[in-house]
Image: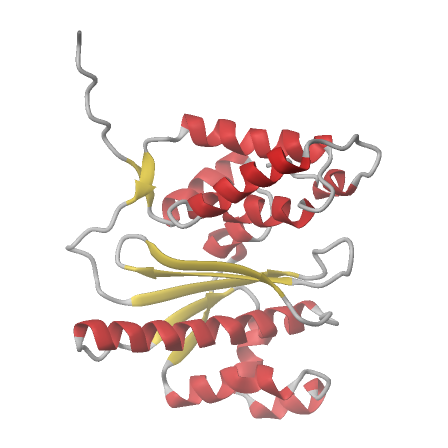
Amino acid sequence: MTSNLKLLYDTSSGTVNVTLYRQIIGSLMYLTNTRPDICFVVNTLSQFMVEPRHIHLVAAKHVMKYLKGTLDYGLRYASDCDFKLYGYVDSDWGGSVVDRKSTSRCCFSLGSAMISWQSRKQSLVALSTAEAEYIATCSTSCEAVWIRKLLSGLFDVELKVANIFCDNQRCIKLSENPVHHDKTKHIENRFHYIRDIVQKGAVKLEYIATEDQVADVFTKPLSKTKFEYFRDKLGLVRKDLPRKREN
């Protein structure tokens, strides 16, 4: 995807067939169930379903060209990997050009590939990067608790603490130290849920460098090198295609 998202909000481009655009985006939405690498771009393009323009259709076709060149890529789950739940969380502070709301992105890995990923716009406008990350971490922790209960019920095993990697040090300190909460009274109480989860030992927040933050692939457009690096981290690998029969 182009690194300049502001182009998508350019109203000077001509309108296109609404039905055709919605059909393309609807198909791509279905495909995000197995291809997390296109989750961000599909989430972005789906915001223009009401009045799509030529530049949006071009971007959608660009995604289809990428998929055509990577038809042999898919998530591979190996049986010899560690059965431990890892999560990655990130947010783009004020990323929406229209209402300046941030978007929470997270993904969870269990073994060799991702098993869950999501991208949701936050319900309020964050006043700082730390607040945006804190809200995103709260929703990610809720997802982690749900996944832990699901896996425990399916396999009847006691899972270890779920490690969630965050690239914001202040967000981690807010979840561990209640003293800082005096300075964050403007944050709604429901977002302090993460602190209780951390104290109960269900979730543990750990710092990770931004260049290793896998959730970045759900947050913003990346260069080709970084995109391919994070795509590998998601567990998307090239699979061997069956040979074509010769007539």
What x and y, as percent, mark residue 55?
A: 71, 32
Residue extending furthest toward the right: 12
Q: Quadrant of the C terminus?
A: top left
Colour convention of the picture: secondary structure
- The count of marks equals 0
List the single residue furthest toward the front.
Answer: 19
Residue found at x 37% / y 43%: 232
In terms of image quadrants, where is residue 49? top right
Q: Nearer the viewer, residue 75 or 42?
A: 42
Quadrant in which the N terminus is drawn: top right
Q: Residue furthest top?
A: 247
Q: Is residue 114 visible?
A: yes
In-image side of 122 versus 214 (left or right): right
The residue positioned 51% from the left and 86% from the top of the image is 195
Q: Quadrant of residue 228?
A: top left
In the foreground, 56 or 122 = 56
Question: Which residue sits at x=53%, y=44%?
Answer: 26
